[in-house]
Image: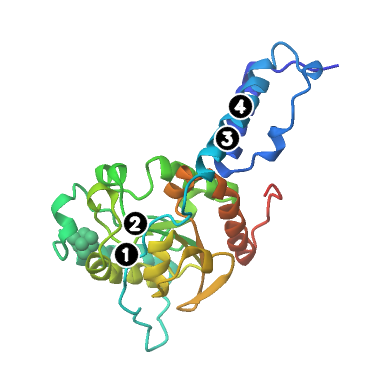
Amino acid sequence: MARSLDQATREALVERVRFYRDLGLTEFYRRAVDPLLVTEEEQPLATLAESVATQQAALLTDISTATSHEERPIPVRKSFPAPTHALEIIPSADRAAALQLIRDDIGDCTRCALHKGRNKLVFGDGDPAARLMFVGEGPGADEDAQGIPFVGRAGQLLNNMIAAMGLKREEVYIANVVKCRPPGNRTPEPEEGNTCSPFLFRQIDVVRPQVLVALGATAATYLLGQRQPLAGLRGRVHAFRGMQLIVTYHPAYLLRDPRQKKEAWADLQIAMRELGLKSSGKG
Ligand code: SF4
């Protein structure tokens, strides 16, 4: 006999369904719902699950007509300057101050053309001694308004991805290749990326995470110094300045093509394995 759900439980389940849908984990609720096992009170949840499955099927049909899975054109980049000496490891307690020195160095930056359209410079966010660091491309409108990376819809998805890894956002560090918003969210020009990315490398060398996750082709290109399609970089661990680098899709791209969320989850599970985090086994 079917049990009825109280309001709080139903809301929690609805939220859970949405959360797993955001991660692309859909198989568990895409099974047909047996109407005989659903009470009148549970019907809204069953209807939501059916509705989500229907919408996703429609979305998959739309996306299947697209001609390319590449998220954006890959910029040309100068070769990455490899360190010529062993990097000094800054004690954890001093890393916040070390990051502040970099921020002070950037100042009210006008080194590249992106400063012209900037409202707020977006430096970075999170734990200066994080074991896991995410690198994105550049600020969008929400980030430009707030001065914090990944706070819009893509940021919400990134937060969900971090939570699915068993971490809190404040336990990781997040930064971008460029610190000022490119007009219309376009890909940074090579001159802009090459001018700004040394600050990112300095941030990485201060935080020295065990694992870096490059979000999207632009971040991967500037970090690795390789102009290569994302498909050739994903699914494995790259050596990067004594750290481990994993490449995956940018959350903004995942919002446009939710089919790839499962692939992104597989990439994050590589990061989890390297960090010794337990997999939830839901991928
Ligand atoms: Fe300066 Fe970077 Fe902003 Fe360009 S994007 S103005 S280099 S902080």
Residue 92, by quadrant, is: bottom left
Specify whether residue 131 is in view. no
Residue 42, by quadrant, is: top right
Q: Is residue 235 above or below residue 46?
A: below
Q: Which residue is drawn at 60% across and 50% down?
A: 262
Q: Mark 2 points at which residue?
A: 124
Q: Residue at x 41, y 82 (%)?
A: 87
Residue 56 disc label: 3
Q: Distance between the residues labelled 4 and 2?
A: 33 Å
Q: Which of marks 4 and 1 is nearer the N terminus?
A: 4
Q: What element carries label 4?
A: helix
Q: Which colour scheme is used?
A: rainbow
Mark in front: 4 vs 1 = 4
Q: Nearer the viewer, residue 274 or 102?
A: 274
Mark in front: 4 vs 3 = 3
Q: What residue type is labelled 1?
A: Leu
Residue 99 disc label: 1
